[in-house]
Image (spheres, rainbow, N blue to C red):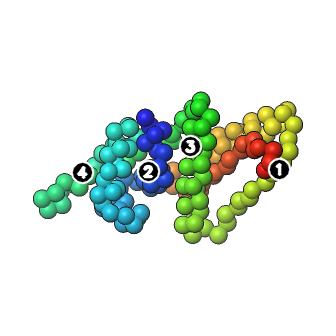
Amino acid sequence: MQLRALGGELRGRIIGLLRESAQSTQQLSIELGIPKGTVGHHLKVLEKAGLIRVVHERKVRAVTEKFYGRVARLFVFHIEDAADSRSAGASTLREAAFQLERTSGEAAAWGLVLSRLSPKDAKRFARRVDRLFEDFRLSDAPGGLPHRLVMAYFETEPRDA
């Protein structure tokens, strides 16, 4: 249910925006450039899936404004179905592309490389990628400058070679 709730690009963007601070439907609507009703629908889906929750409420005239926050700073999904895994990975990369286009930072390093690896080297490299992700995650320092790391390591079909 949680993976399905994150399946759409828009919900991934909402989750990303809520990582650093709680936001209201109005704030998210402005940030994403979409109607409040659309944002509200997606917030309900994410809330029902247990990925976000109301963290603060305030009265604005006769209306109660809700502020939403994530239930965790990190979501880890173990996906056994290969098709679901590819879909989740593609969604993550689309979100990373969206964030990269919006960045004001000058130092963005990226690349797309093809290498032909032996099975032994492929396993070794996969372990190194996992360690790099873990090192990056553990380096999170409150008050530090926000950085993102996105990688995709996968075997391709021979025709891509």
**Cα gap from disc 3 to disc 2, whole angstroms:** 12 Å
| Residue 27 percent coordinates (x, y) | 34, 62
Q: Indicate the amino acid at tag 4.
A: Glu
Q: CB atoms at circles 1 and 2 under 8 Å apart?
A: no
**Cα gap from disc 4 to disc 1, whole angstroms:** 54 Å
Q: Secondary structure at mark 1?
A: loop
Q: Earlier in the sequence, mark 3 or mark 2?
A: 2
The residue indicated by pointer 2 is 11
Q: Nearer the viewer, mark 3 or mark 4?
A: 3
Left or right of residue 12, residue 96 in this image: right
Q: Residue at x 67, y 49 (%)?
A: 151
In front here: 103 or 91?
Answer: 91
Q: Which mark is residue 161?
A: 1
Residue sitting at the far top: 80
Q: Residue at x 75, y 44 (%)?
A: 156
The residue indicated by pointer 3 is 88
